[in-house]
Image (tube, rainbow, N blue to C red):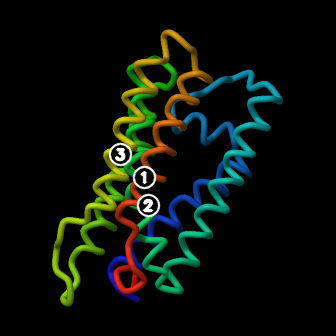
Amino acid sequence: MGIAALTMMVFGVLIAGTGMIGLMAPQFLLNVLGCSDPAMSSNTQIFVMASSQASLAMGLYYILAAVNETRIFFQWSVPLRIMNFMVFTSMVPIGVAPTKWLMVAGLELVGALVTGIALADRDDHGIRFDRFNALRTASVILALVGGILAFDYFGIYGSASIFLVIFTAGFIYAYRKFAPTQAEMA
């Protein structure tokens, strides 16, 4: 197992474990994240458990990708985890999440950077500028800024819609303009 796969394995085990904790003890998970609610409603519990199931499934995807050395999955995970970092971080200053939520954001960023560095450190290619990934990352950053700026005017759903439109357009353009070849993905 290569270093990049190992980073994915560790991240996968961590988020799968967090998902299992949220399924078995949702109140405990909320306390750890600083979102404690002593009188947790059944709706909150259902949402936490459903999100935890998604986290468990995602963790298993990461583990399976690591075991099978699925490098394209590793490559795609880096900009998406950076996007998660940006979205999760922005939740704190706009008052949606408590400060402890930055732990989750930080975990996403550290995991993305470690995996990205492990992917770039290849003897046969070395570190190189990848226009495709750069354009995708720029699309995510632009979409996040657009979503945050639209928050006061359009609310959470309008802001999310603006984010998705910019993000999707940027990814489609990046894929059409600089799609990696099969040899680059190997």
Say which label, 3 or 1, has the lower sequence index. Answer: 3
Measuring 47% from the left and 42% from the top, which residue is drawn there?
167
The C terminus is located in which quarter? Answer: bottom left
Q: Which residue is mark 3?
A: 106
Classify residue 41 by image quadrant. top right
Residue 113 percent across, percent down from the top left = 29, 59
User: Looking at the rendered structure, which numbered label has been put on residue 173?
Assistant: 1
Measuring 57% from the left and 34% from the top, which residue is drawn there?
31
For label 3, the crowd category at 10 Å Cα-Cα, with few meaning under 14, some 14 to 19 and many 20 or more, is some
What amino acid is labelled 2 in the image? Arg
Q: Label 1 near label 2: C-beta < 8 Å?
A: yes
Above-or-below relation of 91 to 56 = above
Front residue of 139 and 15: 139
Secondary structure, mark 2, is helix
Measuring 34% from the left and 50% from the top, which residue is drawn there?
137
Front residue of 19 and 118: 118
Q: Nearer the viewer, mark 3 or mark 1?
A: 1
Measuring 49% from the left and 17% from the top, which residue is drawn there?
151
Secondary structure, mark 3, is helix
What amino acid is labelled 1 in the image? Tyr
Residue 97 percent across, percent down from the top left = 50, 26
